[in-house]
Image (cartoon, rainbow, N blue to C red):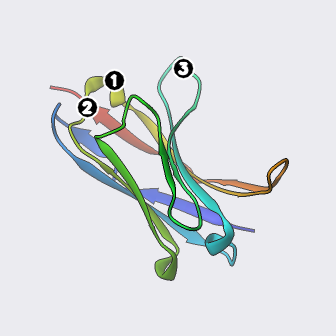
Amino acid sequence: QVQLVESGGGLVQPGGSLRLSCAASGSIFSFAVMGWYRQAPGKRRELVASITTTGTTNYADSVKGRFTISRDNAKNTAYLQMNSLKPEDTAVYYCNARIVTTVVTLGDYWGQGTQVTVSS
């Protein structure tokens, strides 16, 4: 069983920056695709960014050029650097670890979420 713990959220003004961290327990971190999702009130949870075991990244169009996802396999930790934050970035951000094949998900783990609020 894998546990994910997010940290680094908070209140920031538009244009500011935050760095989220996701610390993973368990033995499968190096085998997992890591992702950051977010969910705003009244909206569906959406993928923000993901990174594969080999470092290939993917970003939502809304955050491309502003957010950077990274991982440190030696520390079992994933990060989301968020720059040029906008009010529409306000949401609860969730860390996700997923073990996948091309057709099925073998494991899917979530953190508890951390609140990011962008407001002036």
Tell me the residue that label 1 is attached to.
88
Q: Is residue 113 in sight in this rendering? A: no
Numbered circles on residues, count: 3
Give the CA distance from mark 3 to mark 1.
12 Å
Seen at 52% across and 74% down, the residue is 76
Question: SS class of the residue under badge 2?
Answer: strand
The amino acid beneath tag 1 is Glu
Who comes first in sequence, dot 2 or dot 1?
A: 1
Question: SS class of the residue under badge 3?
Answer: loop
Where's residue 97, x and y in %?
Answer: 63, 57
Where's residue 107, x and y in %?
Answer: 78, 58
Seen at 84% across and 47% down, the residue is 103
The amino acid beneath tag 2 is Val
Few, some or many C-alpha atoms within 10 Å of disc 3 (few <14, some 14-19, many ≥20)? few
Left or right, 14 with reference to 50 = left
Who comes first in sequence, dot 3 or dot 1?
A: 3
